[in-house]
Amino acid sequence: MNTTTASDHERYAWIRLSLEPNLGADTARLLLANFGLPHQIYEQSVGTLNRFIPTALATQLRSTLPDELEAKIQATLHWLQSPDQHLICLADSHYPSALLTLADPPLVLYAKGDLSQLQYPGLAIVGARSATESGKKNAYDFAQFLCQQGWSIISGLASGVDAAAHQGALAAQQAHSTIAVFGTGLDFVYPARNRTLAHQIAVQGLLLSEFPLGTRGLPHHFIRRNRLVAALAKGVLVVEAALKSGSLTTARFAADI
């Protein structure tokens, strides 16, 4: 299945499944394994669903959605009408195979930009937000050089090293450039000072997030983002990082994958 060309009915079901209250990702994957695609899950009777999930949750899946959740799904479908904005699901041919090695691969990914960026080998460059000028120059130069050698540069759009790495990759002027993984929904750029950079990446590279539209940045979101950065990359280059930093968390994620 390719959700970039899927019907609204199919995309609606994927979005609903990913947003369904009280339905964790593990349970959602269990239902997918047993019933197929999300719209097929929602076609099952309460009794059939109850073989795998509690009755209350099975009843919820067969019920009309609350207005607030329905509005979120409709807003997402509207967002997807833009040709450079995409929903990538577990069953999608564009879904990064590297993420399937995770214990908790996202059910869906939100993307803005050039999906072909996911086909290139990636290297992550991460580091301190409050990096020195030397550190930022090193990140920029490494990214530009590595991109010229055929690598796509992956980072998290943070201030400092992340931003410099993205900028260096864009400066290489290659078909493959850079992927910025968000810790928010793609309709929020954090930090706001990188909004122009995010726009440039959307034009020349790819913005990616597992978080639904409207999600603001919370500390644990950036830990989850870091695991995606690590999983997408063949290796992680850390430039200037404190011992208890998100950058080293990314490196540890990479070592464990």
Image (tube, grey):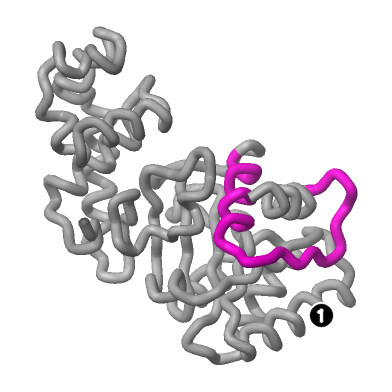
Q: Give residue 10's position: percent from left, percent from top.
A: 16, 47
The residue to which callout 1 is attached is 137
Find numbered disc 1 in the image and state the secondary structure of the residue it sits on: helix
- Nearer the observer, 185 or 63: 63
Q: Look at the image and give the residue range highlighted in magenta.
A: 221-245
| Visible residue check, residue 31 | yes
Q: Give the camera-side residue of 49 and 220.
A: 49
Judge left or right: residue 249 versus residue 4: right
Q: Amino acid at mark 1?
A: Lys
Q: Tell me if residue 229 is in the magenta stretch.
A: yes
Q: Residue at image x 60%, y 64%?
A: 233
Q: Picture coordinates of residue 221 (x, y %)?
A: 59, 41
Q: Residue at x 21, y 43 (%)?
A: 74
Q: Is residue 22 left or right of residue 235?
A: left
Name the residue furthest top. 55
Residue 132 image position (x, y, % from top left): 89, 69
219 sits left or right of 117 in the view: right
